[in-house]
Structure formats: structure tokens, C-alpha cells
């Protein structure tokens, strides 16, 4: 059963203008993005959650001193009692539909790898965990949540009734983010009971969860705080209405465009297109194709040949792994067509492949069958803002 607890949250005080102090998650911020948000306010969360690499190891102690100073001066304040926080997002999706999603922020149990009811949904890529671990050690806080998907039916209905609103902000993409406190003992108990009835799948934040596991083990060895047995999580119900899934595209190096094109020819029929743009994604959907992108912005639709992927899961990422298994290359990941084209223009890749989003039905099948998708298969949007809720580890 999934253990999910309320906690005494730390939040920006009512006197802070949320538009100046919140930011997107650290792992989608470029250095330019980080500077943009830092310039909005000395109290912007990037000062703590995304300290400057140029400050070396001192950046962690500086981050800890900053948030400690915010607590002393009243920039951030602590809830008087343990609470859950409903987190709603109102937005317009890529099809022009008005959407609203709701999840709950709480503390989820940190389980050992391969054990317990908190499950991964995709393989992770090797990634240095020392940065997040050093930041957790220094600040003794969960600064941003992992994103979980509850397999329990009914969570959305439990969150339909509003709580006490404590924050509302519209981000730079026009998404409205609303947070509401739940401190009623009956509602808290209902949420906990429902969460305990089914596993929770990690949708985003696998590395943060792994860091929480390492930090928990350190605290256990030192007889430290049992708060480290849990980590901050946003949990929504796994259903079509609560999820908006985008693709994470593939950016290649250590192989030139022409060589990549020839390597793909065995698995795909190739069809040239002029200029790659956001509209290319619609063409890919209608043709059930992927798209190889040249650094000059032109593209080649990749239309799979009959029978080539008969034994491969119906995921573009899995098909590319199969097609390029014998082709040496280096791979990184980038969301957004505009961002992919920008990376190629700036020499941060020799070519790219645009892929289609994973369906919610496939995510559900992955969870039900205990399978793992290829790394970076899903990009859940809109992104949760950092700075609306912190979880102290004391």
C-alpha cells in the first residue's frame, strides 16, 4: 500500500508576489532561464533550488543560508499543522481545449528499488545525483516534488471540492496554478485511505526519488530524522483527463545526419519535407511517422516498414532503440520542436528525431504489467512550478 502523509508545509508568505518568486523546475531551466527568474526578485526560488554552478561547492551552503534567512525574515512561513495541498492547473492544450487538472501534494514513502508500492515507469539514464543530494543535505528540505500517478480510481473526485486557497499564479505560458490547503481530518483520512489502496507510479522525478532514497539511508545510518523516510510528491490519478503528455525528442551526436539517415533506411521508408515546424507534429500523427531533422531545419518523415517492429513495443523510443541498436551514436533529449531546432542551430547535435507522445493507455498498460518504458519516454505538461510548497526535513 502507498503510504502518503500530510506535513507542515513551508510556503511563501502572503506578502510575496508569487509571479516574482516561483519558477519552472530546475531540470528544464537553461542558464539564461535561471538568470531571467533570478532577476525578478532576490527571493526567487532559483536562488535556493538552482544555485549558480560558478559558486562551486559553496553554492549549497549559500542556498541553505538563503532559505534559512527567508524563514527568519518571514519571506517563507510554516503551516501550523500538517496539511495536504491540492494543486490545480488550468490551461489550454495543444488541441485548443480548456483543461483543468488536480493532484495532491503530500509526503510519499521512499521505497527501496524494486520493492514497495512506489514504482518507476521508465528506465533512467545515468545522471550525476550529487547535485540534488548535496542540496538536500545542505538545506534539509525537499524543494520540488516528484510527480506520481495513483492507480487508485477516485482520487480526482476526492479533490473536486476546493480547499482553502493559499496561492494562485499565472505562469509565462498562461497556465493558472492554484494551491489549496486541506486540513480537515476527514478529508485527509479519505485521501490517505484511497492512496493506500493501490500502487503509485513515478511519472517524473525518478532521479529526485533516487536521491531521496540515498538521503534516507544516510539519515538512518546517522540515526537522523525519520522525515527522510518520505519525500515531497505531487500525485494525480492515472486517467486521460488528468494527464497531458508531450514527447521528449531525441538529439544525436557522434554520428552525422547522412549516416543516421542511411542507418534508418532499413527500418523506415523515407519521405522528405521542407521545413520542420510545430505543424510537423500533426503530420507525424496523421502519417504515424517520426521525423529526422537536419541541422538546416529540413526533415525526413520516417514511416515504418511493415513487420519491422512486430516484436517491439508500440513506443517510438523503443522502435528507435531497436532500429539503431547496431549504430554507434550518442544520445541526449530535448522537449519541444522549437527547442530542438535551436539546439541543432547552435551545434549541440548533428541531427535529431522527433517522436510522437506516448498515449495514456500505454502508460496504464506499462503500470498494469509492471513494465518499463525507454528513458525519457514521457514529458508531462504543464510543468509543476517550484516554490509553491517546500517540505522541511526536521
Image (cartoon, grey):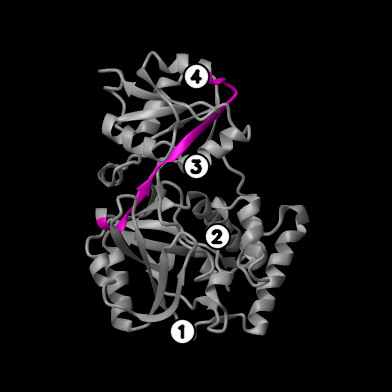
Q: Judge depth for marks 4 and 3 and give the one in front.
A: 3
User: Which residue is the site of mark 4?
Assistant: 260
User: Which residue is the site of mark 2?
Assistant: 216
Residues in magenta, as a range: 241-257
Residue at 29%, 32% in the rendered image: 314
User: Which residue is the site of mark 3?
Assistant: 338
Q: Judge depth for marks 2 and 1 and give the one in front.
A: 1
Question: Residue 297 got which mark?
Answer: none
* Labels 4 and 1 touching (C-beta < 8 A): no
The vertical placement of 381 against 75, above or below, is: above
Q: Is residue 104 visible?
A: yes
For disc 3, the neighbor class at 10 Å (few under 14, some 14 to 19, many from 20) is few
In this view, the residue in front, 254 or 273, is: 273
For residue 35, side relative to residue 171 (left or right): right
Residue at 53%, 21% in the rendered image: 257
- The percent position of residue 307, horizontal first and vertical second, equals 26, 18
Amino acid at each position: 500500500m502507498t503510504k502518503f502523509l500530510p506535513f507542515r508545509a513551508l510556503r511563501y508568505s502572503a506578502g510575496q508576489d508569487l509571479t516574482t518568486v516561483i519558477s519552472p523546475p530546475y531540470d528544464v531551466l537553461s542558464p539564461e532561464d535561471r538568470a531571467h527568474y533570478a532577476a525578478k526578485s532576490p527571493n526567487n526560488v532559483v536562488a535556493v533550488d538552482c544555485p549558480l554552478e560558478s559558486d562551486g561547492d559553496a553554492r549549497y551552503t549559500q542556498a541553505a543560508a538563503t532559505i534559512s534567512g527567508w524563514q527568519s525574515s518571514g519571506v517563507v512561513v510554516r503551516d501550523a499543522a500538517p496539511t495536504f495541498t491540492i494543486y490545480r492547473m488550468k490551461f489550454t492544450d495543444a488541441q485548443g481545449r480548456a483543461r483543468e487538472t488536480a493532484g495532491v501534494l503530500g509526503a510519499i514513502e521512499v521505497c527501496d528499488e524494486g520493492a514497495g508500492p512506489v514504482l518507476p515507469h521508465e528506465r533512467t539514464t545515468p545522471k550525476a545525483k550529487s547535485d540534488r543530494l548535496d542540496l538536500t543535505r545542505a538545506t534539509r528540505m525537499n524543494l520540488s516534488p516528484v510527480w506520481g500517478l495513483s492507480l487508485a480510481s477516485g482520487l480526482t473526485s476526492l479533490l473536486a471540492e476546493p480547499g482553502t486557497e493559499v496561492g494562485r499564479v499565472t505562469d509565462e505560458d498562461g497556465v493558472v496554478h492554484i494551491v489549496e490547503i486541506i486540513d480537515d481530518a476527514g478529508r485527509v483520512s479519505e485521501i490517505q485511505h484511497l492512496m493506500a489502496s493501490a500502487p503509485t507510479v513515478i511519472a517524473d522525478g525518478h532521479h529526485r526519488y533516487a536521491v531521496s532514497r540515498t538521503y534516507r539511508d544516510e539519515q538512518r545510518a546517522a540515526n537522523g530524522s525519520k522525515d527522510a523516510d518520505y519525500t515531497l510528491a505531487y500525485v494525480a490519478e492515472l486517467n486521460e483527463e488528468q494527464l497531458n503528455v508531450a514527447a521528449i525528442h531525441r538529439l544525436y551526436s557522434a554520428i552525422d545526419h547522412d549516416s543516421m539517415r542511411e542507418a534508418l533506411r532499413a527500418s523506415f521508408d523515407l519521405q522528405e519535407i521542407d521545413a520542420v515546424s510545430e505543424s510537423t507534429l500533426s503530420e507525424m500523427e496523421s502519417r504515424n511517422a517520426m521525423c529526422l531533422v537536419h541541422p538546416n531545419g529540413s526533415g525526413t518523415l520516417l514511416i515504418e516498414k511493415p513487420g519491422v517492429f512486430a516484436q517491439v513495443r508500440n513506443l517510438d523510443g523503443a522502435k528507435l532503440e531497436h532500429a539503431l541498436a547496431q549504430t554507434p551514436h550518442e544520445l541526449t533529449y530535448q522537449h519541444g520542436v522549437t527547442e530542438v531546432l535551436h539546439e541543432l542551430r547552435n551545434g549541440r547535435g548533428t541531427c535529431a528525431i522527433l517522436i510522437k507522445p506516448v498515449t495514456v493507455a500505454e502508460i496504464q498498460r506499462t503500470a498494469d504489467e509492471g513494465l518499463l518504458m525507454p528513458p525519457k519516454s514521457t514529458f508531462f505538461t504543464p510543468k509543476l512550478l517550484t516554490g509553491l510548497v517546500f517540505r522541511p526535513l526536521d
